[in-house]
Amino acid sequence: MCGIIAYNGTKKVDSVLLNALKAMEYRGYDSAGVAVFGGGNPVLHRALGEVNNLSEQVLQESFTSGVGIGHTRWATHGGVSLDNTHPHYSQDESVYLVHNGIIENFTEIKSFLEKEGVSFYGQTDTEILANLVAYHLKKEDSLVSALKKTLKEARGAYGLAVVEVANPNEIVVAKNGSPIILGVADHGLILASDVNAIIPYTRDILYMQDGEMAILRENNDYQILNFQGDAKDRPLEHVDHDIGMVEKGDFEYFMLKEIYEQPAVIYNTARGRINYDTGEVKLGGLE
């Protein structure tokens, strides 16, 4: 399971992104990257190995923007390489995207995009997703509309955050099968796939549901929508306990929690990898 982070606020964006990625690193990853927006062209940094390797690059920058996305990757589609490390961007560099999950029909989408003249630098399904969003963005009036069209065509499990370079103060998020949590702090909006990345900044959170999108704007302005574009009124939850208790949930011991989680873990592991209609199994990297 990959780790996602997105931030739109007034704190130093590089600090928030790196701290969040380190908080999720306990799961084990093979590469990491961030993209920061505003004040000119996007700044992209990607590194193989642990998050500290990425930090060495990022801390040499002097960021003023408070908008950014980040990702820690465990390779599925495509091997461990910088070209396959997130964030990914479209060929025309209009869209940057991080993604957790697997797009089942990525080969069909890739074939379609190649016929439209799109070329690819890596082997991931996420890069294909970024280019499909960019393709629809040329015909739609907003990133939200382009993402809605993309999600109608993409099958599989995903939690994703995407930024349009022409509108760098807005992050659009979508969830289907992969965890996404939104945190609302006094200094901005922080979104992650793991609550451990959010708790150091705010205790006011919202667990996004499958079939939901979120728009993260400046000045703590956010909106939750369904995939049809209808607004949803979702209250925030306040988390009182510490990070260790969040990890354990309602169980007294971690081992007990893991025993009871086994059915859900097996099911989530199979998401995007098994077509229950045809009985076909798709394991990334084992073509």
Image (cartoon, helix red, strand yellow):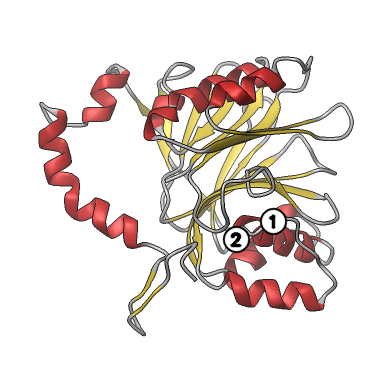
**Amino acid type, label 2:** Asp
In the picture as drawn, the residue positioned furthest to the right comes out as 40
User: How far across and down, in percent of the image, does residue 254 sit?
Assistant: 16, 30
Q: For mark 2, does the 10 Å Cα neighbourhood hold few (<14), some (14 to 19), or many (20 or more) residues?
A: many
Q: Position of residue 274 (x, y in %)?
A: 36, 71
State the separation of the CA atoms marked 2 and 1: 9 Å
The numbered mark at residue 125 is 2
* 116 relative to 126 in the view: left or right: right
Residue count near mark 1 (Cα–Cα under 10 Å), binned few <14, some 14–19, many ≥20 = some
Residue at the far bottom in the pictured view: 278
Q: Which residue is drawn at 80% across and 79% down?
A: 115
Q: Which of 67 and 2 is in front in this view?
A: 2
Figure quadrant of residue 25: top left
Q: Residue at x 84, y 63 (%)?
A: 138
User: What type is the residue that disc 1 sits on?
Assistant: Gly
Disc ID at residue 122: 1
The kind of secondary structure element at disc 2 is helix
Closer-to-camera residue (178/29): 29
Instruction: Identify the element where label 1 is drawn.
Output: loop
Against 90, residue 30 (above or below) is above
